[in-house]
Amino acid sequence: MPTPRLIVADVTATSQNDLYAQVNDRLTADNMVKSTFLNAVSAREKKFPTGLDFGYVSITIPHIDPEHVISPGLLVCRNSASTTFHAMDDPERNLDVQLSIWPLVTDPGNQIDMLEAVITLIQDESSYRILLHGSHAEVANTLPDVLATVED
């Protein structure tokens, strides 16, 4: 079983599609996702928006079915500017998002546990600040509980 990888990506995306393309390029280069990933994540987001509003901040957790994932892991994507996503609880509402967290699970049974772990983590504002502005080592130190849920 491969150990889940943590990837921290700092990007400069100007739109949701641009963000998806940059994430896809990074994950494809790291051999973590299949060639079907980009189309699948775009289609899923249109059908099931992933924006979450925590009051003090909005994030997105774009997730995809395990059939599009080669290797388990977690991508923390920090965009230099906000990108618009639709809220999970109200698809008509737009959220400005700078941080996206991408679970890469190969076992469908792990998806809900991982999403719950991310939501629990982001409820702590200091954790959010570390994920958005911290060094890669600080980010890694913030995420052991989340990464544990990604394992096969």
Image: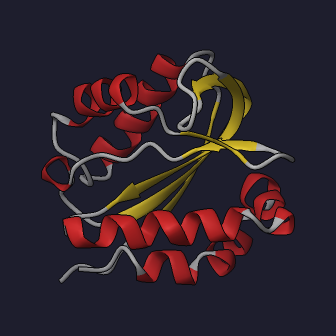
Hey, which quadrant is residue 125 in on the image?
Answer: bottom right
Q: Is residue 40 visible?
A: yes
Which residue is at a point 19% across and 55% down the rendered structure image?
Answer: 66
From the viewer's perspective, is residue 40 above or below residue 34?
above
Hey, which quadrant is residue 106 in on the image?
Answer: bottom left
The answer to whether residue 117 is left or right of residue 124 is left
The answer to whether residue 95 is left or right of residue 61 is right
The answer to whether residue 65 is left or right of residue 27 is left
- Residue lying furthest front: 90
Which residue is at a point 23% across and 32% down the rendered structure image?
Answer: 40
Give the x, y percent position of residue 76. 57, 54
Give the x, y percent position of residue 14. 63, 16
The image quadrant where one finds the C terminus is bottom left
Give the x, y percent position of residue 82. 73, 26
From the viewer's perspective, is residue 41 above or below residue 56?
above
Which residue is at a point 65% across and 27% down the rendered structure image?
Answer: 12
Give the x, y percent position of residue 38. 28, 30
